[in-house]
Amino acid sequence: MKIGITCYPTVGGSGIVATELGKLLAEKGHDIHFISTALPFRLNKPYPNIYYHEVEVNQYEIFQYPPYSLTLASKMAEVIKREKLDVLHVHYAVPHAVCALLAKDMVDDEVKVVTTLHGTDITVLGHDPSLQEIIRYAIDRSDEVTAVSKALVQETQDMLQTTKPIETIYNFIDDRIYYPRAVGSDLKKAYGITDQEKVVIHISNFRPVKKVLDVIEAFAVLKKDCPAVLLMVGDGPDRLRACQKAEELGISDQVLFLGNQKNIEDYLHISDLMFLLSEKESFGLAALEAMACGVPVIGSNAGGIPEVITHEEDGYIVPVGAAEQAGQLGAALLNEEETYKYFSTNAVKRAKTVFSSERIVEQYESIYNR
Ligand code: GMT
C-alpha cells in the first residue's frame, strides 16, 4: 500500500510511535510518505521506500499567525494526488485529521483517512468548548479511528459523544533498541553515581500534567530508606520549579537534570526504577520503554497508565498526587531483591507480549486493509 503519515516530528511519544510504525511498515514492503514540517527525529537511517514531503509554513503579513493547518492540508492534497495514496494515517484529530479531510475533499479522491488519538487533543483540547465541534467532526468523519488506550476511547466518547467506533491499538516500542542490557558502570561513573546508589529515572516534557514536583517529592521519601540518585530527563515549563523543589528538600545533589536526550535507552540501562506520576496520560510511552528494558515503573492511576503497568506484578499504581506512597513503595521495592527481580522479569515479558511491535503493526495493517 501507499501510506501517508502525518505527525508532529519533534520529541514526543506520538511522533515516536508514528515514525516507528512508518519504519516497520516500510520494512514490510509498503511505500511510506511522511508529510510534516521536519524529518521525524527517529528517522535516522535511509529507507528506499520512505519518502519525506516537507510542509513549509511561511509567514505573510496578511496572516496574524503562520497558517500551519492550511499549508499542511494543501501539501497533503498534492501528495495524495501525485503519489496516489491509498491511506492517509494522521496522528491527532486536531489539526491533523481536519487537514486530511480537507485535503481529501480538495482533490476529490478515494483516499481513506485513519486517525489515531494520542490524548492531548482529547484530554486538553476536548475541554475547550470552542474546539469540541471540530474535534467531533474530525473523529466522526475519519474512515477509521484508533486510540492508544481503552481509557482514551472512553474519555473521548464521554466527553464528545462521538458516534464513530474507536478501536484501541496500544503503543509499542522498537524491541531492537529497548531490551534489558547489563552495561558497564562507565555512564554511572561519568555522572558521579556510586555502585551503592540506585538510579531512579523520570522522562517527560515537564508540562504541568506530568507532575514533576511529585516526582521530586516521591524521590525525597525514597531516598530516606535507600541510597539513590534521580535522573530527570527532558525539559519543559516545570523544570525550574522542579529544581527549586529539589533545593527546598535539600536533595539537589542527588537530582540530576539532564535536559532532552537522544539515546534514552542508555539512561534506562543504568536505571533501577521509574516514576511516572502524571495527572493525565493517555498511555505513557516512557513507562513502556522502561519496562522493555527491565525497569519497573511506579505510575499514577491516570488515563491509560494502569493498562500499561500491572499493579503488584510488574510495578505499582498509586493515586494521582500520592507522592509519599510512591516514594515508600519505591524504596521497599529497591530494598527487596526477590520482589524486584520478579517485577523486572514480568515488565520485560509484558512489554514483549502485550505491546509487541509485530502484533501492533499487524493491527494497523488490518485497519488499512479494511
Ligand atoms: O505527553 C505529552 O505531552 C506528549 C504527547 C505526544 O504527543 O507525544 O503524549 C501523548 O501521546 C503519547 C503517545 O501515544 C502517550 O504515550 C502520552 O501518554 C500522551 N500524553 C498525554 O496523554 C498527556
Image: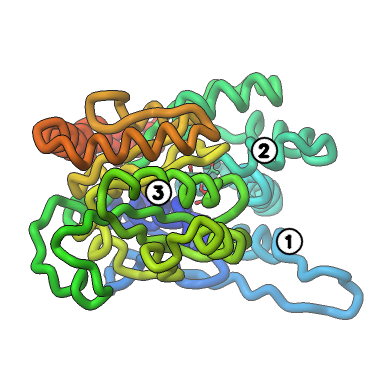
Q: Nearer the viewer, residue 69 or 311?
A: 311
Q: Position of residue 194 (x, y in %)?
A: 18, 66
Inspect this view and state whether residue 32 appears: yes
Residue tagged 1: 70
Question: From the Cβ of disc 1, is ligand 1 less than 8 Å away?
Answer: no
Q: Does dot 2 land on a helix, a strand or a loop?
A: helix
Q: Is residue 345 left or right of residue 92?
A: left
- For marks 2 and 1, give the CA distance: 15 Å
- Foreground mark, 3 or 2, reads 3
Q: Quadrant of residue 258?
A: bottom left
Please say if the residues under marks 2 and 1 sit with CB atoms less than 8 Å apart: no
- Which residue is located at x 65 percent, y 33 percent? 141
Residue 124, placed above or below residue 58: above
Tell me which numbered mark, 1 or 3, is placed earlier along the sequence. Answer: 1
Q: Which mark is residue 219?
A: 3
Q: Nearer the viewer, residue 221 or 234?
A: 221
- Which residue is located at x 59 percent, y 66 percent? 240
Q: Nearer the viewer, residue 150 or 335?
A: 335
Quadrant of the image for the C terminus? Answer: top left
- For marks 3 and 2, give the CA distance: 41 Å
Q: Is residue 150 left or right of residue 289?
A: right
Q: Position of residue 113 (x, y in %)?
A: 55, 41
Q: Nearer the viewer, residue 24 or 206?
A: 206
Q: Which mark is residue 242?
A: none
Inspect this view and state whether residue 84 appears: no
| Mark 2 residue type | Ala
Q: Quadrant of residue 266?
A: bottom left
Residue tagged 2: 138
- For marks 1 and 3, give the CA distance: 45 Å
Q: Is residue 231 left or right of residue 142?
A: left
Residue 125, placed above or below residue 202: above
